Amino acid sequence: MKMLKHIAPLASLALVAACSNGGDVDEQAGVTPDQTASSAPADTATEPTETTAPTTTPGSDAASPLASGTWQVVDTRLTRPGGVQAIGDAELEAARSLQLVVSDDDVRWQGDAIGTTLKAYSFGDNCSSPERVTESEGRFALRCSDGQFFGPSSADEPTFATQSDGTVTVNWYDGITLILRQR
């Protein structure tokens, strides 16, 4: 019994440390794509904050690899698996048919599932005259002409992350992570 007295506080401390992950995009990318939606908690978006980070347009060379063109969703997964989740298996599957269309004038999602299965998940959002707000380690957000960020981004919590294999990871609303590859 004395041993249990010492183990319980350590287990609690370990649980707190595990649950306090800051949501680093690179760590989230290690989640296996075969996890079911019922095993992940709901995700919440953060409010945009002011920043003085450098900006560029997405189609410019400085914004590479999110260059102009069509980016196909090649994989989807839950952003924070391990509890109750708003995204189900049907939504994960439907999101694999989406594309992100990028130009200097506009960034938008396209795909049939936007009007059906994914209607409630803000994939209909559009970003006019996007500017890339650069963060360290390949992470960035897109600020639109109206001053709002595209997706659940803020300057401090970017939605996008470039990966060494040329893909871009996007953490979207309600705890869905999408992996994009340019077509």
Image: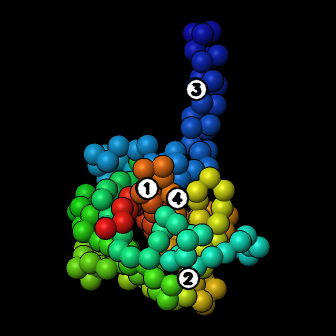
The amino acid beneath tag 1 is Gly
Report the residue marked by disc 4. Answer: 161
Instruction: Give me the C-alpha separation between circle 1 and circle 2.
Output: 21 Å
Total of numbered circles in the picture?
A: 4
Specify the amino acid type for callout 3.
Answer: Ala
Q: Secondary structure at mark 1?
A: loop
Q: Nearer the viewer, mark 1 or mark 2?
A: 1
Q: Where in the figure is residue 162, as x and y percent of width and height?
A: 51, 57
Q: Which circle's residue, 4 or 2, is located before the other in the chain?
A: 2
Q: For marks 4 and 1, give the CA distance.
A: 10 Å
Quadrant for the C terminus, please: bottom left
Q: Which of pointers 4 and 1 indicates the residue nearer the eye?
A: 1
Looking at the rendered structure, the kind of residue marked 4 is Ala
User: Which mark is on residue 130?
Assistant: 2
Q: Quadrant of residue 167?
A: bottom left
Q: Nearer the viewer, residue 76 or 6?
A: 76
The answer to whether the residue labelled 4 contacts the one labelled 1, judged by CB atoms less than 8 Å apart, is: no
Tag of residue 166: 1
Residue 95 image offset from top left, x and y in percent: 29, 67
